[in-house]
Image (spheres, grey):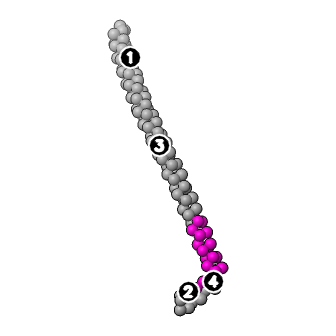
Amino acid sequence: MIENSDRGITLNKSLAWTMLVALLTGGIWIGMQVTDAKVGVQNLADRQAEDRMSIRANSDAINVLRSSNARIDQRLINIEQSAARTENILSDLLRYVRDARPD
């Protein structure tokens, strides 16, 4: 029971103990919740760091594949150009042979 008197507010012992226990229990519960939240945030930060490292590794691998593909593309272009030159030379030779043949 709470009373208001000239001396101020007075509390019944059982009410005072109940309020004290409730405040302590609430403080402990809030502390546990904050600690759990901190642990959860730390776990997320660790996972994020791992994900960033994985993304960097994947980016490096992609860059290697891109440069490899560029080299392969250039080789194929060179082969195509060489084949075109060979075809032109063959066409010239065939033209020369046709023109040089006696009729």
**Dividing the picture into quarters, in which one does residue 85 lie?**
top left
Is residue 39 toward the left or the right of residue 1 in the image?
A: left
Q: Is residue 28 above or below residue 8?
A: above
Q: Amino acid at mark 3?
A: Met
Instruction: Indicate which disc, 1 or 3, sits on the residue closer to the N terminus.
Output: 3
At numbered mark 4, what does the secondary structure look like: helix, strand or loop? loop
Which label sits on residue 90? 1
Query: Toward the viewer: 21 or 33?
Result: 21
Please give the range of residues in magenta: 10-29
Disc 2 marks which residue? 9
Are the two marked residues, 2 and 3, in contact with CB atoms closer than 8 angstroms?
Answer: no
Residue located farthest toward the bottom when viewing the structure as drawn: 6
Distance between the alpha carbons at the discs numbered 2 and 4: 10 Å
Disc 3 marks which residue? 53
Q: Residue at x 38, y 19 (%)?
A: 86
Horizontal and vertical percent position of residue 84: 38, 23
At numbered mark 1, what does the secondary structure look like: helix, strand or loop? helix
